[in-house]
Image: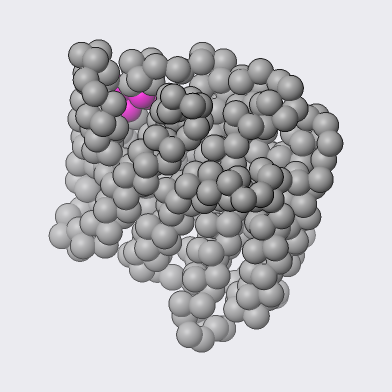
Amino acid sequence: MSFAPVAFSPWWRFPLALMLLEVVVYLSQDMYLPALPVVQAWFGVDPPAAQFSVAAWSSGAALVQLVTGPASDRLGRRVVLLAGVAGFALSCLACALTAGYRGFLAARVAEGCAGIWAISAGYAGIHELFEARTAIRIQAWMNSVTVLAPALGPALGAGLMLVAPWQGMFVLLGAAAGALFLLLWRWMPETVDAAGRAPVSARRVAASYVALLRNGPLMCLLGVWCLVFTVMVVWSVSGPFLLRDQRGGASGFVWAQLYACGSYIAGTRLVARMLHLYPREVLLGAALDICLGGIGATLLAALLLAPVMVVVGLYGVFMLGAGLLMAPLFRAVLERAHQDMGLRVAWLSSVINATGAIASALAALLDVGQFRAFGGLGLLAVLGARQLARSRRGLAASLGAA
């Protein structure tokens, strides 16, 4: 159920606080990436095991929302979001203080659980407060800022490790989450009408998830989103190893990530300009074509043994297309379902984070240590996304009925 944004003023405070929370939560992944070789040595594990600490975060993020999404429909968005922020702050401190690798992995799972359940409750509120075009613009605006986490996160993490142990980044993130808890306490409105809240029924929730799973158009569009996202995750997990300098540092990856995420931001800025000019299915189809051209050119450059700068530059074309694609496609997926908003966002976010976990594990298991392997995997993923988009339940059929 949607409500007019009358419970809060000015309107931008809640989106701003949620955007800052999203930055902090994703920094717990992206600041951590340059520390992977250090964490590997600290705990005495091999590189694939260190990479699994990235997948652990995404696994936690995927699982918990199947419960917290319906809970937010019953209890309200505020209490679920605030509980998630508090849990995220505590799990960051646990990551910093744990002495064994198993305990560290458990803390990473808890960190992903708490951070993403808070964000999903917040996004449910955004899509309830605003109509479709406004919500897409707000989400694109938020994405253009939150992508600074993968853009600046590696640089911040590498810089912080010059002056403090790697555990210091988790202490800093925990303190930032505590400050945001106070802001969200003051600025977040409640979007769930207390009089309309239905009791939580395990049978009803399970039936809703089965209905979402059997919703062909929704799963088709969500599959497009996840396949493109897979390429971005594999790049982030493999990049610190693909772009290590001669001393084993992550400076090459830091600069490459800044460029790639700058390309993504450019794509998100184009969305707001193009929404009123083109139908959404045309815009999304063009974005997918840009993604395909970019990742195909990346693979070709890698096969021809082009300089690393050329390969990274062509990957930026893929990221430009991804920036155009993600925000309007997320809204399109939401519009394909009619369940409660918290349950819808929880389902989408769970599938997306499960994709992130699988992609992280895939990068570790396959040891995507060469640009050719990365480009080949990326091309297969984008070709699959394009095939889904052009299927009978793809973009034109789904959005034409929206």
- Is 220 on the left or on the right of 99, as rendered? left
Residue drawn at x 51%, y 14% is 366
- Is 296 on the left or on the right of 35, as rendered? left
- Is 281 on the left or on the right of 245, as rendered? left
Residue drawn at x 50%, y 32% is 249
Is 379 colored magenta in this rendering? yes
Q: Nearer the viewer, residue 222 or 152?
A: 152
Q: Position of residue 15 (x, y in %)?
A: 49, 70
Let me know if residue 91 appears in the view.
Answer: no
Let me know if residue 371 appears in the view.
Answer: yes
Q: Quadrant of the N terminus?
A: bottom right
Is 245 colored magenta in this rendering? no
Q: Is 273 drawn above or below residue 153 in the view shown?
A: below
Residue drawn at x 77%, y 52% is 93
Q: Extreme left residue here?
A: 277
Colour setting = one colour
What range of the chain is rendered magenta?
378-382
- Is 381 on the left or on the right of 102, as rendered? left
Q: Nearer the viewer, residue 221 or 260?
A: 260
Q: Position of residue 391 (x, y in %)?
A: 30, 28
Q: Position of residue 294 (x, y in %)?
A: 23, 32
- Residue 291 sits in quarter: top left
Q: Nearer the viewer, residue 378 or 342?
A: 378
- Residue 64 sits in quarter: top right
Residue drawn at x 57%, y 15% is 365
